[in-house]
Image (cartoon, grey):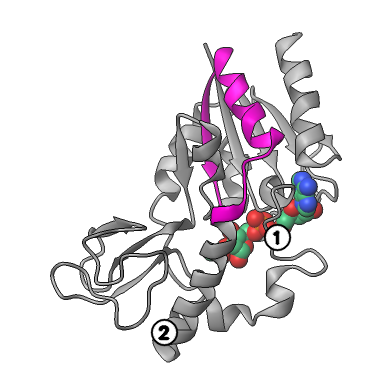
């Protein structure tokens, strides 16, 4: 089967009711990004960061995957599909995607502040807080404080190398719902081989190289069109 690599951003979850970051009314319009999503911000005010991600988590649990997430699962019948997502939500997994690589971390996980490899899926009985909320007082079984398992600005993107390796093997590369402004994620598209077909689904697409087929539609509609294009070839 041919390799289909999909790179997703906040736009694919917009129709599930998850707020994007840079659209009008987006998260970064209402919260100072350097306070709630940077390494320095976490050092300055970890309580604020816990509160912010507790709020996002509460919204995520009541959200459902949409037809775009499900469409990518449907494509697994005909392609070897790898999803690389900038999203911290778990909607690809809940839709049933088999291979999901998170570039910017995962909202439903926290990790030890001192031992990065100790990652806990929420809710977690091993933590001092058993629910979906964490705070500066939450302790893991070793007595260590925890932090959201999120890649903050100013931090490295540990899964980027794996993402590049996947992109380099793509026969078809699809970008969905991202403003393509945050690096290194935005550069993934350029790792796809020259021979690959490249598509970009976004109702308000950013500038992309000429060989990219732009589908200027919302994710649900755009993925439906993509399935038709790819399965009728
Ligand atoms: P942005 O908010 O920057 O961009 C959202 C994109 O989704 C825009 O291009 C919109 O046009 C598009 N969009 C809006 N509604 C859509 C819909 N229904 N269907 C398809 N597309 C739609 O979000 P990202 O590019 O994902 O990082 O942002 C990248 C990173 O910046 C995020 O992962 C996050 C943020 O800071 C961290 O928090 C670490």
- In the image shown, does 158 or 212 lie closer to the viewer? 158
Mark pair 2, 1: CA separation:
23 Å
Q: Position of residue 110 (x, y in %)?
A: 35, 64
At 57% from the left edge and 56% from the top edge, which residue is drawn? Answer: 60
Q: Which residues are magenta?
A: 61-86
At 66% from the left edge and 33% from the top edge, which residue is drawn? Answer: 174
In which image quadrant can residue 219 be found? top right
- Return the disc, 2 or 1, that comes first in the chain's sequence: 1
Q: Say whether mark 1 is within 8 Å of ligand 1.
A: yes
In which image quadrant can residue 158 be found? bottom left
140 vs 229: above or below: below
Helix, strand or loop at label 1? It is loop
View quadrant of ligand 1: bottom right
Q: Count the labels in the image.
A: 2
76 vs 158: above or below: above
Q: Is residue 68 left or right of residue 163?
A: right
Tell me the crowding category of disc 2: few under 14, some 14 to 19, or many 20 or more residues within 10 angstroms, Cα based. some
Q: Is residue 154 left or right of residue 20?
A: left
At 77% from the left edge and 26% from the top edge, which residue is drawn? Answer: 224
Q: Position of residue 230 (x, y in %)?
A: 72, 16
| Residue 40 forms part of the magenta stretch | no
* Residue corresponding to mark 1: 20
Helix, strand or loop at label 2? It is helix
* Residue corresponding to mark 2: 46
């Amino acid at each position: 089967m041919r390799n289909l690599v999909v790179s997703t951003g906040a736009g694919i979850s917009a129709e599930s009711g998850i707020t994007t970051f840079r659209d009008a009314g987006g998260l970064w319009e209402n919260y100072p990004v350097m306070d709630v999503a940077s390494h320095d911000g976490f050092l300055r005010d970890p309580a604020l960061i816990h509160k912010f991600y507790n709020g996002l988590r509460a919204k995520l649990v009541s959200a459902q995957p949409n037809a775009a997430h499900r469409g990518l699962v449907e494509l697994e019948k005909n392609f070897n599909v790898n999803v690389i997502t900038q999203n911290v939500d778990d909607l690809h997994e809940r839709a049933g995607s088999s291979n999901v690589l998170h570039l910017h971390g995962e909202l439903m996980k926290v990790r030890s502040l001192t031992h990065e490899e100790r990652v806990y899926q929420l809710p977690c009985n091993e933590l001092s807080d058993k629910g979906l909320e964490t705070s500066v007082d939450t302790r893991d079984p070793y007595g260590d404080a925890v932090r959201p398992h999120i890649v903050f600005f100013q931090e490295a993107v540990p899964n980027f190398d794996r993402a590049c390796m996947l992109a380099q093997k793509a026969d078809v590369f699809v970008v969905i719902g991202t403003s393509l402004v945050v690096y290194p994620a935005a550069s993934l598209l350029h790792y796809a081989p020259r021979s690959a077909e490249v598509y970009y689904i976004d109702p308000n697409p950013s500038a992309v190289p000429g060989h990219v087929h732009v589908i200027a539609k919302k994710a649900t509609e755009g993925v439906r069109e993509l399935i038709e294009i790819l399965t009728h070839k």
